[in-house]
């Protein structure tokens, strides 16, 4: 058997039913003390509601309290009162009830206090003009009674209007109860008028009018107990123009009321002046209020525009203008939050391979179009990450949340970039990408630099993906230490040159030297393979290269004039990309006195291909400077460039020469022979590097290789050692 849920009766219904029972019980007992006790209970109920919800409930509390005082005063009075005193005493609770009921249907708005004040002053003027002054002039109750009748008529109309208004209130509940209370407050006047309006008995405790007033208090108490009592106040907004007309009418008409009651010049003239002054002041106030309102609207509009502009500026400050992705600043800010948080996170940096060539070949407008398309592909992963950002140039970043598969995502990003060429107009531009991954933990604020180190490691490895580990940071520290040492070496002159002889296989004489940079730090000789890559990465290679060229040309000028030697100097990509490189070379030649024909600039195959779109080599060659391809056969497809690039010398990589054993293998010999035949067919001078044995030297002589260099003929040495070799060669007969 299931339990039956009995609906709980609301407290306001208990108050309503119990109140009516108590009122009729008090009438049956016909005891003044019981009436007073009952009204005291209504005062306590209203007090509780007024202190919780305030607003118009204070007026209602005042009305019930005033009614209690009136009942106590006349109930304990020895003789029954006459009509006028009774009317005057009841006017106060009636007026307070009407004011409270009126306030319930209104919504507070700016100026409502002023409107209420105007109404109070207008009513005060009415009371003074038609009640107080006539009574002072002709003591008696006849005119007062007429004024009270008019006042009660106004109160009844107010109560009737508020009752009708509250009956249409959509919140029902307390509004209906208050409307019923207002109608019940009007009922005593109707009953009194219907019974001939004789005596005050109906309004004394136990009378029919008194009973109706007590029923109104019961309805008011039930409305106060209702759960929606606190929400009751907000009604529809009033008509501002109607309120303004009412205030203006009251301000102008109120000063004229004494003149109507006492139409003498002494009263009329000040009344007219006061009325006119009040009208002008109110007009001025209205004008100022409208001006203030217009300026407030303009200020709000300006604030809205400022807020919109601020939002736009904030967006622009946090997003990349070209791609619309978050920029480096916003990513750094979000990384800061992640570092300060307690969740694991990660960062992927992605860079495009060969994008610089896109800008150089097709122009920046095409490059920008490619970057926008790249951003579109990368945004496909936005749902899997917390942020996609453009770091700058051709680098992009992905901020990862907890649980993200960084390696898998990085692989898919790299694949997405290289999956298809980027289409710009009629161009199909293929690109590849590489990525560096770094994982972050709370307090690790170096995750961005860690990911950058991983990205650099991926580039050095030839592309693909690399993940950060501590060894990369150690390498970075070593690079920073070496870079700092190089900067100091440029200043203190600890960089110096060694030279390796280049020998003519036919005569055995030294015909040239290759200049090689050396660096001694704290007494230790640093290998070029260690500091040259750091110089290239940090951009110091330009300064170091210029210093090496000047030192070598100054020394080679002496050897050229005395022995006819030429000089070979290595040149990097960074130097060839320098717009002022050609002028710098020509200026050094002029300063040192070395002829242009005695200088050979040596470039690796990779550098040669990278410099294919520059005209610097053509300019230098036009002045007589020769160009050599170093390490030929190990880099890019140089054969395709031999017909178009200004090349004079091929330097056969030592890896081919070292294959020549004793006795040599036919396949190794054929490779070397093919390169030599290629050089002769292109009218290029060939130089074999890395000759370390007599057997290799003899074989190259048999293959008719014009020039050779290597440890067999001399290691890189100081200028003094080369001077010794040159003096010995001068006194030795030719081979």
Image (cartoon, rainbow, N blue to C red):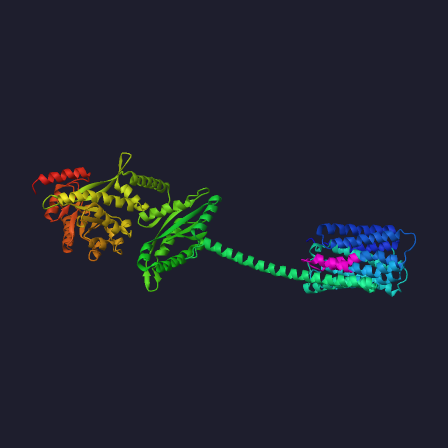
Q: Main secondary structure of the magenta part?
A: helix
Q: Write down the region rendered in magenta.
A: 95-122
Q: Is residue 87 left or right of residue 490?
A: right
Q: Residue furthest top?
A: 523
Q: Is residue 287 above or below residue 507?
A: below
Identified at 29% across, 34% down, the residue is 522
**Where residue 631 sits: x, y (%)?**
21, 48
Q: Is residue 332 left or right of residue 678?
A: right
Q: Is residue 636 magenta?
A: no
Quarter of the image for residue 500 reads top left
Residue 561 visible to the viewer: yes
Q: Is residue 191 above or below residue 565?
A: below
Q: Residue furthest right?
A: 79
**Where residue 252 sits: x, y (%)?**
74, 63
For the C terminus, the image quarter is: top left
Q: Is residue 301 left or right of residue 411?
A: right
Residue 735 visible to the viewer: no
Identified at 34% across, 64% down, the residue is 425
In depth, the one of 642 and 254 nearer the eye is: 254
**Where residue 415 sits: x, y (%)?**
36, 55
């Amino acid at each position: 058997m299931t339990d039956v849920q009995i609906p709980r009766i609301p407290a306001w219904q208990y108050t309503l039913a119990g109140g009516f029972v108590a009122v009729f019980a008090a009438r049956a007992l016909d005891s003044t003390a019981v009436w007073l006790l009952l009204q005291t209970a209504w005062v306590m109920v209203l007090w509780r509601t007024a202190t919780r919800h305030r607003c118009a409930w204070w007026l209602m509390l005042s009305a019930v309290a005033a009614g209690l005082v009136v009942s106590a005063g006349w109930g304990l009075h020895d003789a029954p009162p006459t009509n006028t005193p009774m009317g005057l005493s009841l006017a106060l609770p009636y007026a307070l009830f009407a004011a409270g009921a009126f306030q319930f249907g209104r919504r507070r708005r700016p100026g409502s206090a002023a409107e209420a004040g105007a109404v109070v002053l207008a009513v005060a003027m009415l009371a003074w003009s038609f009640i107080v002054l006539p009574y002072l002039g002709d003591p008696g109750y006849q005119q007062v009674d007429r004024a009270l009748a008019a006042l009660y008529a106004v109160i009844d109309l107010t109560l009737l209007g508020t009752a009708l208004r509250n009956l249409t209130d959509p919140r029902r509940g307390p509004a209906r109860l208050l409307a019923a209370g207002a109608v019940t407050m009007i009922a005593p006047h109707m009953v009194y008028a219907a019974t001939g309006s004789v005596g005050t008995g109906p309004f004394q405790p136990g009378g029919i009018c008194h009973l109706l007033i007590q029923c109104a208090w019961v309805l008011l108490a039930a409305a106060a107990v209702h759960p929606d009592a606190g929400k009751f106040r907000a009604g529809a907004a009033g008509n501002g123009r109607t309120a303004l007309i009412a205030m203006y009418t009251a301000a102008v008409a109120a000063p004229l009321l004494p003149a109507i009651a006492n139409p003498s010049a002494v009263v009329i003239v000040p009344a007219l002046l006061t009325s006119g002054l009040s009208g002008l002041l109110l007009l001025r106030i209205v004008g100022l209020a409208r001006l203030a309102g217009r300026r407030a609207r303009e200020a709000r509009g300006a604030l809205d525009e400022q807020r919109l502009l601020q939002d736009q500026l904030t967006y622009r400050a946090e997003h990349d203008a070209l791609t619309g992705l978050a920029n480096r600043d916003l990513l750094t800010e979000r990384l800061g939050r992640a570092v300060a948080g307690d969740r694991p996170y990660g960062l992927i940096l992605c860079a495009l391979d060969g994008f610089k060539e896109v800008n150089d070949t097709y122009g920046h407008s095409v490059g920008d179009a490619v970057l926008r398309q790249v951003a579109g592909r990368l945004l496909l992963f936005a749902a899997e990450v917390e942020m996609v950002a453009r770091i700058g140039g051709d680098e992009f970043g992905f901020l990862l949340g907890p649980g993200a598969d960084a390696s898998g995502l990085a692989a898919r990003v790299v694949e997405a970039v290289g999956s298809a060429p980027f289409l710009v107009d009629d161009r199909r531009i293929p690109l590849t990408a590489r990525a560096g991954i770094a994982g972050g933990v709370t307090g690790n604020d170096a995750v961005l630099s860690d990911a950058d180190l991983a990205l650099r490691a991926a580039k050095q490895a030839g592309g693909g993906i690399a993940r950060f580990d501590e060894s990369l940071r150690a390498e970075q520290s070593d690079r920073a230490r070496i870079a700092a040492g190089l900067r100091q070496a440029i200043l203190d002159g600890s960089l110096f040159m060694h030279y390796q002889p280049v020998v003519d296989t036919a005569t055995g004489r030294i015909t040239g030297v290759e200049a090689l940079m050396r660096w001694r730090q704290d007494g230790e000789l640093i290998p070029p393979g260690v500091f040259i890559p750091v110089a290239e990465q940090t951009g110091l290679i330009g300064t170091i290269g210029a210093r090496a060229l000047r030192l070598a040309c100054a020394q080679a000028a002496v050897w050229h004039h005395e022995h006819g030697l030429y000089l070979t100097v290595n040149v990097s990509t960074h130097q060839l990309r320098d717009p002022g490189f050609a002028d710098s070379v020509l200026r050094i030649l002029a300063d040192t006195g070395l002829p242009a024909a005695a200088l050979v600039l040596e470039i690796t195959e990779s550098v040669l291909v990278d410099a294919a779109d520059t005209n610097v080599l053509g300019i230098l060659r036009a002045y007589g400077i020769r160009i050599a391809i170093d390490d030929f056969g190990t880099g890019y497809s140089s054969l395709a460039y031999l017909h178009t690039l200004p090349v004079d010398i091929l330097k056969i990589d030592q890896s081919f020469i070292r294959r020549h054993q004793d006795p040599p293998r036919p396949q190794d010999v054929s490779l070397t022979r093919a390169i030599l035949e290629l050089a002769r067919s292109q009218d290029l001078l060939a130089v074999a590097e890395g000759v370390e044995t007599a057997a290799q030297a003899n074989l190259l002589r048999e293959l008719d290789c014009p020039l050779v260099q290597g440890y067999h003929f001399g290691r890189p040495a100081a200028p003094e050692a080369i001077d010794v070799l040159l003096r010995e060669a001068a006194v030795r007969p030719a081979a």
